Image: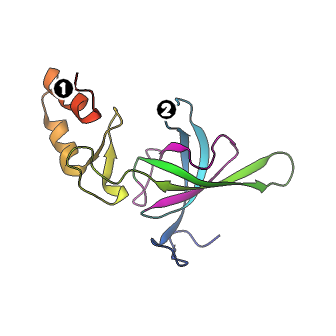
Amino acid sequence: MEAAGKKTCNYRAHCRDNHEASIRYSNLNAVDYHEAKMYNISDSGMYFESEHNGVHRGSEIFIKVPENRDVYTRDGYRAEVMWCREIPKDGAGACYGIGVRFVVNRCDHCGEKFPHREIHKTDNFLFLCSDCLRRLENLPGGKLKGSVENYLMGNVI
């Protein structure tokens, strides 16, 4: 493992920041989260390890980073599992190394492309840039704000 905070590129499109952090992840529409440890992150994806064997190549997951996160990460990511490999452990059980690619990098409102770290997830699973999120948060509560959120989610009935 490289030193924490050190960047490595290894012929990749985006350099990786070697950084360890506790994370939680879940299948996209599930409510149960599994504990894991992130070891590196880039603008396009991350690598983490988990004792849970519930993800498969091609599945979408949601990753949460606890409140005590630092400047390397944001609070959540939507990602596609690119690979999952068993890592033998000494003693009982196994661990799984999981490589993911971030899915969302466009704002659901304005459609502009942003680095993954600049897209924010709302409680209703909208992914918004900082400007659009600020505009939504500044709307008065009630029917207007609810109607705007429903429109952005595609619920226009």
Q: Is residue 136 left or right of residue 10?
A: left
Colour scheme of the picture: rainbow
For the point 16% across and 25% down, which residue is it? Answer: 141
Q: Disc 1 versus disc 2: distance between alpha carbons?
A: 23 Å
For the point 34% across and 54% down, which residue is it? Answer: 105
Residue corresponding to mark 2: 29
Quadrant of the rendered image containing residue 98: bottom right
- Provide residue 14's location: percent of width, then percent of height: 45, 71
Residue type marked 1: Ser
Quadrant of the rendered image containing residue 122: top left
Crowd tier of the residue under label 2, counting other residues whose Cα lies within 10 Å: few below 14, some 14–19, many 20 or above: few
125 within the magenta span: no
56 within the magenta span: yes
Principal secondary structure, stretch drawn in magenta: loop
- Provide residue 23's location: percent of width, then percent of height: 54, 47
Crowd tier of the residue under label 1, counting other residues whose Cα lies within 10 Å: few below 14, some 14–19, many 20 or above: some
- Provide residue 144's location: percent of width, then percent of height: 13, 25
Quadrant assignment for the N terminus: bottom right
Q: Is residue 4 left or right of residue 157?
A: right
Q: Nearer the viewer, residue 6 or 8?
A: 8
Reading the chain from its start, which is encountered first: label 1 or label 2?
2
In the image, residue 156 sits, relative to residue 72, either above or below, namely: above
For the point 42% across and 63% down, which residue is it? Answer: 43
In the image, residue 21 sits, relative to residue 145, either above or below, namely: below
Q: Nearer the viewer, residue 78 or 32?
A: 78
For the point 22% across and 44% down, which residue is it? Answer: 109
- Provide residue 51's location: percent of width, then percent of height: 70, 45
Give, as a single range, the part of the protein colored magenta: 44-73
Residue corresponding to mark 1: 147
Under tag 2, what secondary structure?
loop
Q: Nearer the viewer, residue 21 or 32?
A: 32
